[in-house]
Image (cartoon, rainbow, N blue to C red):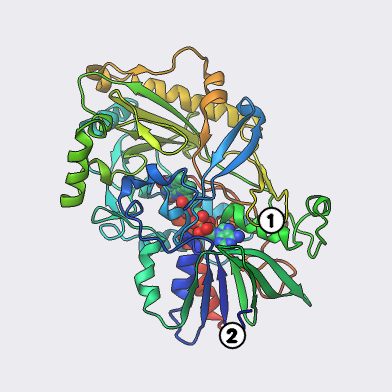
């Protein structure tokens, strides 16, 4: 039993958890404990940006969940990686920097999120991700110019800092959370945190359950990597930062959730809340086009070239190994609405997963992809066992509405129009898969963009109030992707950092040491 008194116990050292710990421990009087299932890994695969192709399926660093068969996707089960390492999913993600639209945060405010105003959320992105420091622009490649020219030919003007123009119909180069050729994840806060004597990290420790007494978390049940169980006594506040899958799963194991989810597992209900409901994600439809007359990333990663590519990276921190998941992109509306409803991703390479890693294809090719920014479909996370090591049931319920089908299908058609623009003619693009219609292509090939959110949503009918406190439990809050009421119009790492940061600031403002 750990009996030491902590003012704050943060469960999960992922994106939000690290940012939260960083703020809370700024006050030296606060004693902060951070508990994480994964390790504090020094594996260089995490620092080299292209290393994400290797960690995607690695059970040492990744929870490697799978969804239930998805009804609209030909009953395919969709693979759902989540980081299991200090730094969480920010250690295994594609590093594309994206901040959403101010309208997203106006919607959040309408849902009851009142920690900060929408404009203040936008200002937070500048504060936490200053350009030129944690953020760098992808290295340029002749095919990126072709993509940007094709966008121009489709009426999408180019902008610098694409992430600052997500409410417009524009194209540009993505910035990445990469600094000096290395991944800049939430782990980048670690050197600072480790120097602070008031922060303790407990790694390789899986949280099993919360035990409540008189409306408060009284004890945390945990187990070390070898499954040796132990308890942590709670004197102050507990904040869940286990992510959009881990947080609802822990709450349900602890009796917080819907009775229909709990009683089949003989779990006594402690608090009736819609835990695990409201799951949202971006459904990505990607297409590979073979090209001629150009050298793509695939050639740099093939045969003897990989040695030169790795050498270039280790000596100069340059080249293909500094690449994130996509180098250039665009925001647009497939229906000519003023507010963009679709995001485009383009990369000057293509890969196939072999179940262990992403392997560059053996021919020169590009990948183009689109997703609907604000899908209407809602899914669910529900545990199927009390075992903290077992995977919960994840049902994304993609494409449950006609609107979602329409925008997704039109996004795919837009890709085809882009690839047919004169800017690409020299490269003779040829789609790799040609023998299906649009709907079948989506059913057979669409996949997650890795942005599950919303399973412990903020709001009157949600799980947490506007201050991110769990309804009905005195000393329990949530800070991670699960509190997001409606998915933002873009990739989700930066907003998770903001969520951790703003909850930390709000808690500091009303600090009460134990
Ligand atoms: C493959 C991939 C690619 C992505 N690409 C991008 C991108 O390019 N750009 C972008 O902006 N976003 C991207 N994302 C999304 C983004 O990384 C996430 O939305 C964000 O990091 C989620 O932050 P979080 O704090 O909610 O959860 P996480 O960062 O996942 O942190 C949760 C932490 O809790 C720990 N945990 C969970 N359960 C337990 C337990 N029972 N006990 C102890 N610890 C536990 C986990 O190990 C983890 O460290 C990607 C995500 C993935 C997985």
Quadrant position of residue 208: bottom right
Specify the quadrant that holds the C terminus.
Answer: bottom right
- Residue 491 in view (yes/no): no
Disc 1 under 8 Å from ligand 1? The reply is: no
Q: Is residue 239 left or right of residue 368?
A: right
Percent position of residue 98, x then y: 41, 49
As drawn, the label of residue 5 is: 2
Front residue (pair 43, 298): 43
Along the horizontal axis of the image, is 496 left or right of 389?
left
| Distance between the alpha carbons at the discs numbered 1 and 2 | 28 Å
Q: Position of residue 474 (x, y in %)?
A: 70, 75
Q: Position of residue 299 (x, y in %)?
A: 24, 29
Q: Note whether ligand 1 is within 8 Å of mark 2.
A: no
Q: Nearer the viewer, mark 1 or mark 2?
A: 1
Q: Which residue is mark 1?
A: 387
In the picture, measured across the screen, residue 366 lies left or right of residue 308, that is right
Mark 1, residues whose alpha carbon is within 10 Å: few (<14), some, or many (≥20)?
few
């Amino acid at each position: 039993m750990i009996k030491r008194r902590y003012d704050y116990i943060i469960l999960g050292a992922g994106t939000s958890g690290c940012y939260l710990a960083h703020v809370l421990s700024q006050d030296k009087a606060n004693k902060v404990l951070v508990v994480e299932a994964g390790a504090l890994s020094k594996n260089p695969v995490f620092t080299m940006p292209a290393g994400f192709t290797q960690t995607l399926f690695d059970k040492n660093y990744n929870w490697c969940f799978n969804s239930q068969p998805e009804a609209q996707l030909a009953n395919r089960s969709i693979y759902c990686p989540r980081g299991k390492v200090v730094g969480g999913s920010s250690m295994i993600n594609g590093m594309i920097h994206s901040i959403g639209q101010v309208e997203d945060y106006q919607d959040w405010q309408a849902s009851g999120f009142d920690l900060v105003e929408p404009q203040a959320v936008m200002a937070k992105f500048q504060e936490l991700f200053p350009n030129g420091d944690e953020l760098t622009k992808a290295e340029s490649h002749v095919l990126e110019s072709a993509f940007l020219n094709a966008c121009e030919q489709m009426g999408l003007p180019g902008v610098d800092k694409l992430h600052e123009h997500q409410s417009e119909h524009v194209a540009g180069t993505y910035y990445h959370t990469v600094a000096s050729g290395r991944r800049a994840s939430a782990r980048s806060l670690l050197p600072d945190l480790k120097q602070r004597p008031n922060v303790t990290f407990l790694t390789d420790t899986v949280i099993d359950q919360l035990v409540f007494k008189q409306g408060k978390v009284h004890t945390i049940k945990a187990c070390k990597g070898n499954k040796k169980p132990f308890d942590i006594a709670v004197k102050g506040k507990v904040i869940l930062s286990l992510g959009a899958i881990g947080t609802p799963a822990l709450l349900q194991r602890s009796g917080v959730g819907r009775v229909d989810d709990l009683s089949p597992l003989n779990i006594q209900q402690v608090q009736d809340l819609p835990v695990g409901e409201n799951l949202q994600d971006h459904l990505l439809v990607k297409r590979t086009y073979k090209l001629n007359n150009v050298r793509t990333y695939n050639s740099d990663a093939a045969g003897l070239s990989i040695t030169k590519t790795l050498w270039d990276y280790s000596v100069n921190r340059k080249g293909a190994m500094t690449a994130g998941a996509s180098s250039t992109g665009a925001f647009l509306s497939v229906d000519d609405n003023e507010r963009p409803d679709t995001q485009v991703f383009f990369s000057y390479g293509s890969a196939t997963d072999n179940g262990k890693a992403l392997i560059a294809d053996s021919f020169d090719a590009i990948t183009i992809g689109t997703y609907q920014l604000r899908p209407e479909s809602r899914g669910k996370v529900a545990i199927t066992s009390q075992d903290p090591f077992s995977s919960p049931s994840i049902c994304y319920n993609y494409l449950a509405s006609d609107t979602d089908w329409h925008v997704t299908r039109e996004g795919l058609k837009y890709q085809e129009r882009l690839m047919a623009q004169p800017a690409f003619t020299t490269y003779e693009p040829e789609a790799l898969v040609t023998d299906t219609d649009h709907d079948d292509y989506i059913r057979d090939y669409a996949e997650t963009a890795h942005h599950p959110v919303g399973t412990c949503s903020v709001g009157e009918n949600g799980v947490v109030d506007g201050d991110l406190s769990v309804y009905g439990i005195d000393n329990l809050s949530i800070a991670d992707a699960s509190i997001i009421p409606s998915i933002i119009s873009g990739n989700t790492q930066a907003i998770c950092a903001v969520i951790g940061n703003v909850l930390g600031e709000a808690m500091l403002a009303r600090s009460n040491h134990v």
